[in-house]
Structures are given as C-alpha cells and as structure tokens.
Image (cartoon, rainbow, N blue to C red):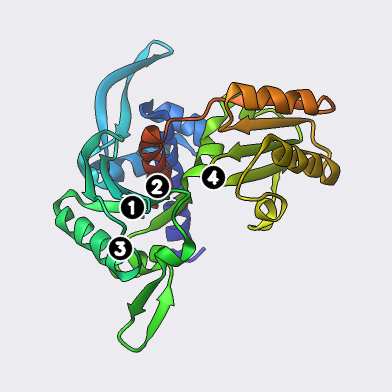
Amino acid sequence: MGKSGLKDIKNQNTNLIMQQIMQARSISRIELAQETGLSPSTVSSIVGDLLDKGIIVETGMQTVEKGRSRKDLSIAADFGSVAIFEISRRSVFFCLFDMCLDTLESTCITKQRVTGNDLFELLVETVSSYADHNILGIGLLLHDDVQPSDLNTIYDTGYASATISLENALSSQLHIPVSEETCSSFTITNALNEETLHENVNCAHVMVGEKVFTTITIDGQKVPLRSEFCKELLSENTSTKEVNQLLNTLCTMFDIEKIFMMGTDFQFYQKLKLQNKHVELIQVHTEDTDTLSPLMAEKVRNELLFV
C-alpha cells in the first residue's frame, strides 16, 4: 500500500478514536482498543500524537482494569471551540462552547430582524471577534419563523457574484464547517430517549408548532418526505381535525405502529388519541428551546474531523 493509502487509514483511525473519546467523555486506552477494534499498539501511537498536539489530555482519573490502573483520556477543553447562532425573525442569539461543551459566552448579538447579507456580515464579524478561541465549527439553529429567503446571501467569489445559502457563504468565507438545523426538526431528533431510539418499530414523529414537522421511520430507516408534505395537508390553523387527517394519511401511506406526538398540550393529545384508536399515540415532552444550543454544539463538535 502506498504512503497516501497508509495516511488515509491513519486519518480514519484518528477520527474513529476521537469519536469514541468525545462520546465517552473519559475513556482509557484499552477501552478505546475494545470499542474501535483497533490494536493496542495502533491506539497508543495515535493517542500519543493527539496528546502531543494538545487535542486530548490525560484527565488524572484512573480506570482499574484487571488489577492495573490506567489513566483516562478526554478531549482538551481549550483545544478549540464551537459557535452556535440561534436565529429568529426578532433576534440572533450567540453561544460559544469549549470542546467539553461548557459555555464560554452566551449573548444576544441583535434584537431586531436581520436577513441576507446583513445577517451574513453580522455572523462573520462575531466569529472574527472570537478568533482567539479557535472556533472549529459553527451551528445555525433556525426558528420556525425564519423563511428560506431570509438566508439568501449574495456572495462574491472574486470572479463572480452568486446567491447562495447562508450556510455555504459562511463556510466559504471562514473556512470552517457549518451545520444548519431548524429548531423543530432538531427537537424531533433529540426528543426521544435512548430506549425509544433503539426500538425497531415502524413509527412517525409529528411535531406541532407554528409549523408541523413529520418524520417517518420504517424498518429502522428514515423515509424521505417532500418538504411541502405537511403544508399540502394542513392550513395555517392546525386544529385537532386537520392534524387527525394528517395522521390518517400517514397511516394509510405507511404501515405505522406508533406515532410520537410532540408540541401538543395534554387536551389536544387526548382528543387525537380518542380519534386514532387503530394506532398507538405517545406524547413526548420535548426539550425547552434553551437547551437546544448545547445539543447543537455537541452535534457540531462530534462531526468535526481532526486530521
């Protein structure tokens, strides 16, 4: 195998080890070998490089395995940071997290509607002002009142100008990976507990808010739906009757065993449950929006590549 092939394998193994360290928060070398399937010598070599670069640290915590004491490893909090922008039509909120997901900064950077290039320039200026924190990733959390057109940015490449998404404009300008999520869809992803996530059942997740969001899981795989699917079935006033029609349509189209309802109060949920006795409805209490920024920071951090 050539040098480039060996380097690619080492890079893959390095990112695999980093994923395990971030998920476990604190883990020993022998546990890394067990979880990744890599040899102890490969783990030791890569861990040594990561320690030398300051990406990870030995925590001082010790794991006793078969009578031997081993030092645990964790990501270095000050190696870099993750920036999260929570964007609504009325404000933009900024949070900065270290690599251990502790909050370094939390502030509202504007209390008025900002769109297009003005929004792009505001975010670039904010990231640039925190350059000493070595921002490695950016997350954009969009409230339901934000329209796609609000995010269009006229970006000058030096050769030509083009209208592109805010996500792509930031990534091109700052050379930092950018991830974008709507609050509603991200809430659906994070609302279900570990037990629910591992259930191998055909189910629908329906979140009722200013808009209605739906995801379908069949045989453990998400089924793609048209972006306008819910909008075509519902008016802006999402009454119990209309949501019930949506649920009936989903059950007709897919072999659904359970429907997880989010964003509904108890009375609304009870009415739906009485009208849908042919399928199991489960009310899920979702995360408060205040907790979404740390969850988004974790997602952005865990998607980073370290080589």
Among numbered discs 1 and 4, the one appearing first in the sequence: 1
Disc 2/disc 1 C-alpha distance (Å): 6 Å
**In contact (CB < 8 Å): disc 3 and disc 2:** no
Q: Is residue 142 above or below residue 26?
A: below
Q: Which residue is mark 1?
A: 137
Q: Is residue 5 above or below residue 142?
A: below
Three-letter amino acid code of the residue under disc 1: Gly
Left or right, 39 with respect to 85, comes to right
Kindly tell me whether residue 47 is visible in this rendering. yes
Element type at mark 4: helix
Q: Nearer the viewer, residue 205 or 221?
A: 205
Disc 3/disc 1 C-alpha distance (Å): 18 Å
Three-letter amino acid code of the residue under disc 2: Val
Three-letter amino acid code of the residue under disc 4: Ser
Left or right, 272 with respect to 15, comes to right
Among numbered discs 2 and 1, the one appearing first in the sequence: 1
Q: Which residue is mark 3?
A: 119
State the residue lying farthest toward the top: 67
Kindly tell me whether residue 219 is visible in this rendering. no
Which label lies toward us, 3 or 1? Answer: 3
Disc 3/disc 4 C-alpha distance (Å): 22 Å
Which quarter of the figure has residue 45?
top left
Q: Which residue is mark 2?
A: 300
Q: Nearer the viewer, residue 7 or 1?
A: 7
**Which of the numbered marks, if any, corresponds to residue 185?**
4
Which label lies toward us, 1 or 4? Answer: 4
Residue 146 screen position, x and y as percent: 44, 55
The residue positioned 66% from the left and 26% from the top of the image is 269
Residue 145 screen position, x and y as percent: 45, 52
